Image: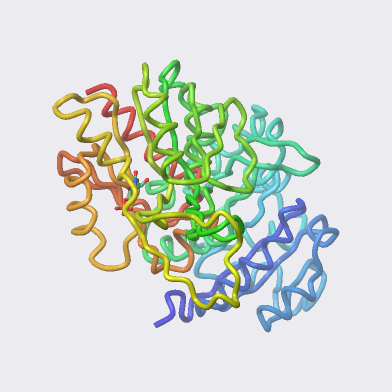
């Protein structure tokens, strides 16, 4: 059954550039079976049209309080909702909600809503960190409002930092959690810790190697054996670790992603190159995170000129690549440094497969992805993982942005560094 079947969602959209992403939120909610009533602020309407939401939800989307007056529109939408999501929530809208203003349809609806309310803040970093906004967010939290994010990343006008709205998939997942009786605040501590103010500097001075991306194993000068890894998870880990004070070297297999601020990047192509770069850079390293998808096999020999079709289908002999993580684990033997973090992509019996791999590779922590899910794993900005600890611990991280997942993984790394 659809996970939001029959759920009545009030989707509030306020006036930031991220309003365009609210259309995808509406689409995902409808896809999950929800009935969605959209209320836009006048500011939101400058960014995205009512028609878009009406087309997606099949229901009227509104801006003004002055329509359908006999049906009590100003309170009816709030009263009939099972859950309200304000996506994006601008600084202005958060302030109005905190103060209890009722000067447009969104604010009257939310004042009349007895249901759980989730807000997804989106604004420039300075606005998010301003004491007025901090205060308003705190007031809302104390009132039981679920505050989701914001994320860290590119903002409007080329800026970068905390203030980016959380991904549509994460918002819809949060709606489902709240409807199921959960608390987003309880399961998303990393979302709040991702703001500059709350971000710990608990990796200050720690030397860290992070590998990311998918290796390419040449067949001839133009062809290779590759995989679907985009590098997003590893780059997010490098970025968040650097923000928390680590000295990060990122050994990157081919990836289109920009180098995160403050990170030293070493580009490699093949598993063998990655192996050599990792082992050449071990001095003083306290943490190694192996987020790269390393090819297990490579063509025995790569042709020096392009293979011709006329010569018929080639036979490609494969030989195993070194397992970098297992080698690091074996080399470390009984020592507890460097802390070793591996990743595993699994499709079946994820936990058991992860436990076996954790032991076999001699790692301390293993981040297991269920790559059979569409919204987690390869090429997407979100991930849902199971974090296994060699001492038997496990943490389920529900669908979150890869930056938030990185925060949870690094929390576990810090715990191991402190013994
Ligand atoms: O065995 P599997 O490929 O599932 O293991 C994944 C983990 O092992 C990842 O952390 C990956 O970076 C690492 N790995 C490695 N060298 C290989 C294959 C995988 O370091 N040749």
Which image quarter holds the N terminus?
A: bottom left
Relative to residue 149, is residue 184 drawn left or right?
Answer: left
Q: Nearer the viewer, residue 106 or 212?
A: 212
- Which percent across, then down, holds residue 272? 41, 42
Residue, x 64% and y 57% (percent of image)? Answer: 87
Q: Residue at x 44, y 80 (%)?
A: 2
Viewer-proximal residue among 411 and 60: 411
Q: How is the image coloured?
A: rainbow
Residue depicted at 44% across the width and 57% down the height: 399
Residue 339 percent across, percent down from the top left: 29, 29
- Indicate the quadrant containing the C terminus: top left, top right, bottom left or bottom right: top left
Question: Which residue extends farthest front?
Answer: 311
Q: Nearer the viewer, residue 209 or 381?
A: 209
User: Can residue 353 be seen from the camera position used here?
Assistant: yes
Toward the right, the furthest residue is: 46
Task: Note whether 21 is above or below 388 in the view shown.
Answer: below
Which residue occupies the foreground of this view, 319 or 150?
A: 319
Q: Residue at x 47, y 30 (%)?
A: 241
Residue 345 percent across, percent down from the top left: 35, 58
The number of numbered discs placed on residues in the rendered structure image is 0
Compared across the picture, whether 58 is left or right of 82 comes to right
Q: Position of residue 317 (x, y in %)?
A: 37, 63
Q: Quadrant of residue 168?
A: bottom right
Residue 117 visible in this rendered orientation of the protein: no
């Amino acid at each position: 059954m659809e996970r939001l079947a029959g759920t009545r969602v009030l989707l509030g959209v306020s006036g930031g550039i991220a309003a365009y992403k609210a259309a995808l939120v509406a689409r995902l909610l409808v896809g999950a079976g929800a009935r969605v009533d959209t209320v836009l602020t006048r500011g939101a309407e400058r960014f995205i049209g009512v028609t878009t939401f009406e087309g997606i939800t099949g229901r009227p989307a509104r801006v003004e309080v002055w329509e359908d007056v006999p049906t009590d529109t100003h309170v009816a939408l709030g009263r009939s909702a099972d859950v309200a999501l304000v996506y994006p929530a601008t600084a202005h809208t958060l302030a109005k909600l905190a103060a209890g203003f009722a000067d447009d349809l969104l604010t009257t609806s939310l004042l009349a809503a007895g249901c759980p309310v989730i807000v997804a803040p989106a604004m420039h970093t300075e606005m998010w960190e301003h004491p007025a906004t901090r205060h308003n967010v705190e007031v809302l939290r104390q009132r039981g409002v679920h505050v989701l994010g914001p994320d860290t990343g590119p903002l409007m006008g080329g800026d970068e930092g905390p203030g980016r709205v959380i991904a549509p998939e994460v918002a819809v997942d949060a709606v489902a959690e709240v409807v199921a009786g959960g608390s987003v605040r309880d399961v998303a501590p990393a979302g709040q810790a991702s703001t500059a103010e709350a971000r710990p500097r608990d990796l200050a001075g720690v030397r860290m190697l992070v590998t990311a991306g998918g290796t390419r194993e040449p067949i001839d000068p133009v062809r290779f054996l590759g995989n679907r890894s985009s590098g997003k998870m590893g780059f997010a880990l490098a970025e968040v670790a650097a923000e928390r004070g680590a000295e990060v070297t990122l050994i990157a297999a081919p990836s289109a992603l920009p180098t995160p601020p403050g990170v030293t990047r070493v580009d490699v192509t093949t598993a063998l190159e990655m192996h050599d770069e990792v082992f050449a850079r071990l001095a003083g390293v306290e943490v190694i995170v192996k987020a790269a998808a390393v090819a297990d096999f490579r063509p025995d020999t790569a042709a020096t000129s392009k293979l011709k079709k006329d010569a018929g289908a080639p036979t490609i002999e494969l030989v195993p690549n070194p397992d970098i993580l297992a080698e690091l684990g074996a080399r470390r033997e009984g020592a507890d440094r460097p802390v070793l973090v591996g990743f595993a992509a699994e499709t079946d019996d994820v936990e058991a497969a992860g436990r076996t791999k954790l032991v076999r590779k001699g790692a301390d922590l293993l981040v297991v992805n269920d790559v059979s899910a569409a919204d987690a794993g390869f090429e997407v900005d979100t991930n849902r993982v199971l974090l296994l600890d060699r001492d038997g611990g496990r943490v389920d991280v529900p669908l979150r942005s890869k930056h938030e997942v990185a925060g949870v993984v690094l929390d576990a790394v810090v715990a191991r560094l402190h013994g």
